[in-house]
Image: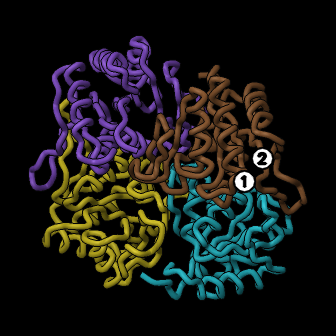
Chain colours: A brown, B purple, C yellow, D cyan
Amino acid sequence: MTTPARLIIGVIGGDQAPDDALAVAYELGRAIGERGHITLTGGRGGVMREACRGAKDAGGLTLAIVPGEDLSDVNEYVDIPVITGLGFARNTLIARTANALIAVDGHYGTLSEIAFGLIAKTPVIGLDTWQLRDANEIDAPIVRAGSAVEAVATAIRIARVHPQAR
Amino acid sequence: MTTPARLIIGVIGGDQAPDDALAVAYELGRAIGERGHITLTGGRGGVMREACRGAKDAGGLTLAIVPGEDLSDVNEYVDIPVITGLGFARNTLIARTANALIAVDGHYGTLSEIAFGLIAKTPVIGLDTWQLRDANEIDAPIVRAGSAVEAVATAIRIARVHPQAR
Amino acid sequence: MTTPARLIIGVIGGDQAPDDALAVAYELGRAIGERGHITLTGGRGGVMREACRGAKDAGGLTLAIVPGEDLSDVNEYVDIPVITGLGFARNTLIARTANALIAVDGHYGTLSEIAFGLIAKTPVIGLDTWQLRDANEIDAPIVRAGSAVEAVATAIRIARVHPQAR
Amino acid sequence: MTTPARLIIGVIGGDQAPDDALAVAYELGRAIGERGHITLTGGRGGVMREACRGAKDAGGLTLAIVPGEDLSDVNEYVDIPVITGLGFARNTLIARTANALIAVDGHYGTLSEIAFGLIAKTPVIGLDTWQLRDANEIDAPIVRAGSAVEAVATAIRIARVHPQAR
C-alpha cells in the first residue's frame, strides 16, 4: 500500500485550550476537510473537538483514536472512533497513523505526540506550540507555520514528498 | 456519543485460511458494505483481505487496525489504516472498536480477538470458528451463524439492541 | 541475552475464583518461590493475590504487570509492579514476558492470556481451565497438569528445553 | 499498596550516546544500586546498558521494559526483562513504572519518556538533556542536576515526598 490520495492529517492539542487556539483548531479542520483529507484527533474536547467541528462543517471525514474503553468522552463530531482503552499510550498511535501532524498550543500530551511523531518520522508542523532543544542545543525539526491555512498546505505538501512509503 | 447509524463491524480470521473461509470472508465484507456499515479488520492478508475486497466491491468503507509500524503489510482494499506499531496487542483495539465481531475460522490471533471481544462485551458471532469451554463446562457466548448473510444480519441486530452506550 | 537461570513463571487466573482455585494458586506461588524462580501475575486479587502470597511465603520474588495507572489495585504481595495504564491489553505483556504460563480456572481475561501465550509460543500449562478447540476440531496445545507441584515442574522443564532463545 | 522502601528509579537516554553521557549513566546505575533501589531502563544499549552495568557492579537489581518481541536486543546486565512487543509505545510504561526518572542526554525516544513522565506526574530529573518550553514560554518542570550522585539523591528524595499514592 502506498500513500493514498486521501491523506490523514492529525491535529494535536489540549483538551483545555485558550480561545485563539480553539479558533485555529476549527480553521485547521475546515481546511483539511475542504481539501478532501481526513482529520485525525484524539477524539476528546478542546482543540480536538474544534478541529472535528471544522472538518464536519467542510463536509470532511473525522477519525479519532480514543484513550478510553468506550465512547463516553468522544466528541459529537467524530465519524469513526477507534477505541483503544490504552489511556495516554494511544498518543503513539496518533503519531504513527497521521501522514503529518499539526500541533496547536498544547500541554504534556501534545508534547508526547510531537515526540512520537519525531520518532516515527511523521512530519510535525507547529502553530504556536512547544519549542524543544536537545543537549547539543539543536532544535527539534518542527516546521513552524503562521496560520491554519499555511499549516495545512505545508502538511499536505510535506506528506506528499515524504520519502517513505507511508 | 451514542451508537451511530453507521456501525463498525469487525471481521476476524487468519492471514492464512482455507478457500471456503476466504469465500465467506468476501461475502461478509460484501454484506456489510451493502448495508452501509464500515468493515473493520486487522488489515493484512487472507480473511482480512477478502473481507476488505468484498466491502469495496459493495461500495463500502474499510477501516484497518494494523500491527506494524508502517503500511508495508496492509492490503490494497483498506481505505483507512490505523498504524499501531503494537504487534499482536493491536488485537485488543479491534475487539473494542467493533460494534460487533464476526469470527471466521482463525488461529490463535483470532482466538485472542474473540477473548478480548468477550472482555469488552462486544458481541461475537462465529462462523465455523473456535469452541471455547471454561472449567465449569460453560461455553463462551459466541452466537453461531450458518452463513455470511445471517452473520451480518445478526451482528447488526445485536449491536443495535446492545444495552451499553457503545 | 539467553534464557536465564532464574525463570519468570506466569500464574494466570481470575480476580474472582472459587476456593479450590485460590488454594491451587497459593501452592503454585509457593512451588515457584521454593525453586528460586520469579512469580509473575497481573497484580490484582483472587488467583493473582494468592500466587503472590505463596511466593512470598517461600521467600520468592514477585513481579506484576498491572492494568491501571497507579498502584491502587495492586495486592500487597507484589515486590515489583510494572504499571502499564493499558487496561486489559496488559495481558499481552504477561504472556510474552513469562518463560511459561500456568492457567488456573479463569474467565475471559485468562482466556486472552492463554491466546497470547499461544501466539508468542510461550508454553501454557493448564490446571482445570479453558478447553479450546478450533474449526478443524484441533485442541489448542495446553499441557494439562493434575496438581500445582506437577504444573510448576512441567513449566520449568518445558521453559528450559524451549527451542527459542527466550 | 503504598510507595515501597525499595524504589524503582528509571534511567532514560539513547541507544547511542557520547562517552561522557555513557560515563554518567554508569555512575547513575552505581549510585542507585548502592542505595538499594531498582534501576529501570529500556533494556537496550548505550545509556541503558551502562546504567545496568553500573547497577550490577554495585550489587543492585535491574529491571527493563523492552520494546521487542523477545530478548534479542536486551543487554546482558538486565536481571528482569519485561517483554512488551509494543515498540516505542513501551516508553509510556517506563514513565509510569518509575518512582522517578533521570534523563541523560537523549534523542526523541528520551523526549517521549520525559513527556510521559510529565503526564504521569512522575518526577523527572535532567542531566544535560532536553529543554522544553511551551507556547506560554513556560519551561517544563525538569529538575536539573549537576552530577550523577546529585541526580540520584534528588530522585530518591522527591520520590519519597511525592504526594500521590504511587
| Residue at the disc numbered 1 | A105
In depth, the one of A57 and D165 nearer the eye is: A57
Give the vertical position of C15 relative to B165 (above or below).
below
Q: SS at mark 2?
A: strand
Residue under the point 71% across and 42% down: A102
Give the vertical position of B18 relative to C19 (above or below).
above
- Neighbor class of circle 1 (other Cα within 10 Å; few <14, some 14-19, many 20+) is many
| Residue at the disc numbered 2 | A127
Horizontally, residue C58 falls left or right of residue B40, namely left
What amino acid type should be assigned to the residue bearing mark 1?
Answer: Asp
Q: SS at mark 1?
A: loop
Q: Earlier in the sequence, mark 1 or mark 2?
A: 1
The tag on residue C32 is none
- On the image, the x and y values in percent for residue C134 come to 22, 35
* Screen quadrant of the N terminus of chain A: top right
In depth, the one of C129 and A151 nearer the eye is: A151
Residue under the point 65% across and 47% down: A12
- On the image, the x and y values in percent for residue C108 come to 25, 52
Which chain is indicated by disc 1? A
Spot the residue most to the left. Answer: B137
Residue under the point 31% across and 64% down: C11
Q: Quadrant of residue C153?
A: bottom left
- On the image, the x and y values in percent for residue A142 come to 80, 46
Residue under the point 77% across and 56% down: A130
Spot the residue most to the right. Answer: A137
State if disc 2 and disc 1 touch (CB < 8 Å).
yes
